[in-house]
Image: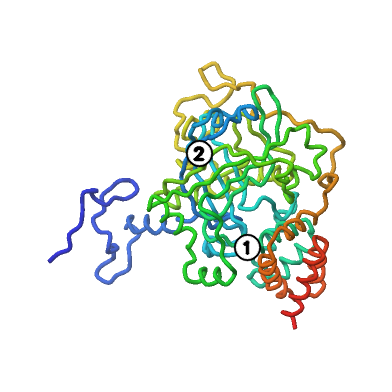
């Protein structure tokens, strides 16, 4: 009995639409002879196959994503004029991409690494991208150090492997990293899934209201599923058995109709209070204490639709913190300032100059109108429209209304360190975090840190690193020193 196929889709065709007579045998010069260059079906398939991949992201290469909805639950119009935040109950379509930071596209989900949190709001005023992590802080505070930091996390040029020497050499020479390293090696360093972790905008952003008043804001996304984490042993086992664990969990939960959600909160600081705050509010290695600026609940984020094609919608999705809308803007955060350039530049290299035209990236609730034309992948969407401004042919025009408020600056240009505030140093918040942990949490933190630090081959790097943790908390440093010494016997 012959196998039955559903042929309702019509005949198989080439990219140019011509029907294909045989998709199983190549055209040859006689039975058993060499193949012919005139077999355009074969050549087209092989040529396309060779070009199926685009360069993976240098960081955040391995990821998963889903579409969802953001719903406003509180009135924030006294803080921002952003239209998608303009009224309680207003809904905005979103796309959220999760990722690990340092691993390659073929890595495992269950590894100790920060998780990327890249959220796109498809608003009526254009797309707003909020790019952060599952931690409120980061390893460094100045973008000029970012390539060096990532080089330590990636493969060594000689060995081809990640080297503990490189990681700890950089961290120990960059004491501002102690706070984030404490986060990373604590219980929340390996989330059990993307659904069971919080997200953060991490950076400080500007909100401005209709009256022109300025506020600084930090975003928090608190998981409604509850925090769940993996121990190092659990993660090692899961990474070997199911490297796609987090991606699978996200997809299958949405398929089951168990839509993951997060309560969206913000901390809001009047701009006038920033200069006198105890910590530099634009330092990415610091948090704002909740006792100083309590979190305010403003909305709900729900993920409720899986992408149909991972390559088209996840791999080719692009996010940039430079994608603002009226009422929201940047801050003087040096890491954010660097990312305003670097993210867009990375996507222009990876996906192409017309990456914003792809369905997952283009505005869904409005239309992009400008003079940008041509380039690889351009689809001719503008037709006969003029490609310059101003013009007298009915083209788009400038509004004269800035998206955000100007920030006062003064003083000479220079390569300045990030300004320190009254309680600023590289260790105070790391010490606070350590002391907030229970004894069991501290035990696991010391075990995780010492297990990695003990792999370092140079004693001076080990001692330099331990000294930094001791500056955060004396007990922290002593316990780590004992644990490392025991492992290095």
Q: Where does residue 162 sit, x and y in percent of width and height?
A: 65, 68
**Mark positioned earlier in the residue sequence (2 or 1):** 2
Q: Quarter-wise, where is residue 188 in the image? A: bottom right
Q: Where does residue 45 sit, x and y in percent of width and height?
A: 37, 57
Q: Quarter-wise, where is residue 441 in the image? A: bottom right
Q: Where does residue 35 sit, x and y in percent of width and height?
A: 33, 65
Residue drawn at (81%, 44%) of the image: 278
Of all residues, the one furthest to the top in this rendering is: 392
Query: Can you identify the residue that label 1 sits on?
Result: 187
Mark 2 to mark 1 CA distance (whole Å): 29 Å
Judged left or right of residue 33, residue 421 is right
Query: Can you identify the residue that label 2 sits on?
Result: 70
Residue drawn at (48%, 44%) of the image: 302
Instruction: Kindly tell me whether residue 286 is visible in this rendering.
Output: yes
Residue drawn at (46%, 55%) of the image: 250
Quarter holding the C terminus is bottom right
Q: Nearer the viewer, residue 196 or 26?
A: 196
Q: Nearer the viewer, residue 115 or 63?
A: 115
Query: Is label 1 in a helix, a strand or a loop?
Result: helix
Disc 1 residue crowd, few under 14, some 14–19, many 20+, Cα 10 Å? many
Q: Where does residue 364 sit, x and y in percent of width and height?
A: 46, 35
Mark 2 or 1, which is nearer the eye? 1
Q: Nearer the viewer, residue 263 or 5?
A: 263
Q: Quarter-wise, where is residue 41 in the image? A: bottom left
């Amino acid at each position: 009995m012959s196998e039955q196929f559903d042929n309702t889709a019509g005949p198989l065709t080439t990219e140019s639409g011509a029907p294909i007579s045989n998709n199983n045998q190549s055209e040859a010069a006689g039975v058993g002879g060499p193949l012919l260059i005139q077999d355009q079906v074969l050549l087209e398939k092989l040529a396309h196959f060779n070009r199926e991949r685009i360069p993976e992201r240098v960081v955040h290469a391995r990821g998963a994503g889903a579409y969802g909805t953001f719903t406003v639950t509180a009135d924030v119009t006294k803080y921002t004029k952003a239209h998608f935040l303009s009224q309680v109950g207003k809904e905005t379509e979103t796309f959220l991409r999760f990722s690990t930071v340092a691993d390659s596209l073929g890595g495992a989900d269950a590894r100790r690494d920060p998780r990327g949190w890249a959220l796109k709001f498809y608003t009526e005023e254009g797309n707003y991208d909020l790019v952060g992590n599952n931690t409120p802080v980061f390893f460094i505070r100045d973008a000029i150090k970012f390539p060096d930091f990532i080089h330590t996390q990636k493969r060594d040029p000689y060995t081809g492997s990640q080297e503990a020497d490189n990681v700890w050499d950089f961290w120990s020479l960059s004491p501002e990293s102690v706070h984030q390293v404490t986060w990373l090696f604590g219980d929340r360093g390996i989330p059990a899934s993307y659904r069971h972790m919080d997200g953060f905008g991490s950076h400080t952003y500007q909100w401005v209201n209709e009256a022109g008043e300025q506020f600084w804001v930090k975003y928090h996304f608190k998981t409604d599923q509850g925090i769940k984490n993996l121990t190092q042993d659990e993660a090692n086992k899961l990474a070997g058995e199911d490297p796609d664990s987090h991606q699978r969990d996200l997809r299958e939960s949405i398929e089951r109709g168990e839509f993951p959600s997060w309560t969206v909160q913000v901390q809001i600081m009047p701009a006038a209070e920033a200069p006198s705050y105890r910590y530099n509010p634009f330092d990415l290695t610091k948090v704002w204490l909740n006792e100083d600026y309590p979190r305010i609940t403003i909305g709900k984020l729900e993920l409720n639709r899986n992408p149909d094609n991972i390559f088209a919608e996840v791999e080719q999705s692009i996010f940039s913190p430079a994608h603002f809308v009226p009422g929201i803007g940047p801050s003087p955060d040096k890491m954010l300032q660097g990312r305003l350039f670097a993210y867009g530049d990375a996507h222009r290299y990876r996906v192409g100059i017309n990456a914003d035209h792809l369905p997952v990236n283009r505005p869904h609730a409005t239309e992009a109108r400008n003079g940008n034309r041509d380039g690889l992948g351009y689809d001719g969407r503008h037709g006969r429209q003029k490609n310059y401004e101003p013009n007298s042919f009915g083209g788009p025009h400038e509004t004269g209304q800035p998206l955000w408020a100007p920030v006062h600056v003064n003083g000479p240009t220079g390569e300045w360190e990030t300004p320190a505030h009254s309680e600023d140093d590289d260790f105070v918040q790391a010490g606070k975090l350590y002391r907030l942990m229970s004894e069991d949490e501290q035990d696991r933190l010391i075990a995780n840190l010492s297990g990695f630090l003990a792999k370092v081959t140079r004693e001076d790097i080990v001692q330099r690193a331990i000294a930094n943790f001791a500056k955060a908390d004396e007990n922290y440093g002593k316990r780590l020193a004992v644990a490392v010494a025991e492992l290095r016997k």
